[in-house]
Image (tube, helix red, strand yellow):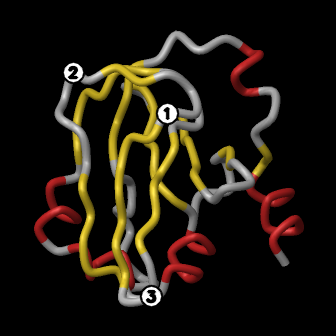
């Protein structure tokens, strides 16, 4: 995982990129779920507020909802993981993002997010 991402205590992450932000779940979140067998993502151009459910994941163990770490509008979804959700189980898989968003989130929305290193300490 990228050391520059910011994480929620619920295992979502947001990572700033040149063209917006990538949003997904952390490696630890994937590990907790177990073998992922299904991912449902929203349509592009859908807008979400921070804390809203934007995705559903099903594993052999459980189903989980994924929440927006910051507000934004979906600009792209990762079709690859929709079509092959088992890719998320591969530790070497480099494109584990779920959606890309545009966001005008202010610093208040980022205030409760953890640096990846702090997140890892928090979950270990």
Q: Which mark is residue 45?
A: 2
Query: At x 37% / y 81%, what residue is drawn?
Result: 59
Considering depth in this image, is 70 or 38 the residue closer to the camera? 38
Residue 39 horizontal side relative to residue 124, left or right: left
- Identify the image quadrant of residue 58: bottom left
Image marks 3 and 1: residues in contact by CB distance under 8 Å: no
**Neighbours of disc 3 within 10 Å: few (<14), some (14-19), many (20+):** few
- Find disc 3 in the rendering and name its residue: 61
- Percent across and percent down for residue 43 are 17, 34
Give the residue at the far left of this rendering.
Answer: 83
**Of the pair 92 and 70, the residue shown nearer to us:** 70
> In the rendered structure, are the residues bearing label 3 and label 2 in contact, judged by CB atoms less than 8 Å apart?
no
According to the image, label 1 marks what residue?
Answer: 52
Q: Name the image quarter holding the N terminus.
A: bottom right
Q: Residues within 10 Å of mark 2 (few under 14, many from 20)?
A: few
Q: Tell me the SS state at disc 2.
A: loop
**Which of label 2 and label 1 is nearer to you?**
1
Give the mark, 3 or 1, whose residue is nearer the N terminus.
1
Q: Residue at x 24, y 56 (%)?
A: 40
Query: Is the Cβ of the residue at disc 2 closer than 8 Å to that at disc 1?
Result: no
Labels 3, 2: front one: 3
Left or right relative to 42: residue 29:
right
Image coordinates of residue 25 in percent, x first then y, are 51, 59
- Relative depth, front residue between 81 and 92: 81
């Amino acid at each position: 995982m990228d050391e520059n991402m910011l994480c929620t205590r619920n295992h979502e992450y947001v990572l700033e990129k040149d063209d917006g932000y990538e949003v997904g779940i952390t490696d630890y979140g994937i590990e907790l779920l177990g073998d992922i067998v299904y991912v449902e993502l929203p349509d592009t151009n859908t807008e979400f507020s921070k804390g809203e459910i934007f995705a559903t994941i099903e594993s052999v163990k459980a189903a989980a909802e994924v929440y927006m770490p910051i507000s934004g509008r979906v600009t792209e979804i990762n079709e690859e993981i929709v079509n092959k959700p088992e890719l998320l189980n591969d530790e070497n898989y480099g494109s584990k993002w779920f959606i890309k968003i545009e966001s005008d989130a202010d610093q208040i929305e980022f205030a409760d997010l953890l640096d990846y290193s702090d997140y890892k300490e928090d979950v270990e």
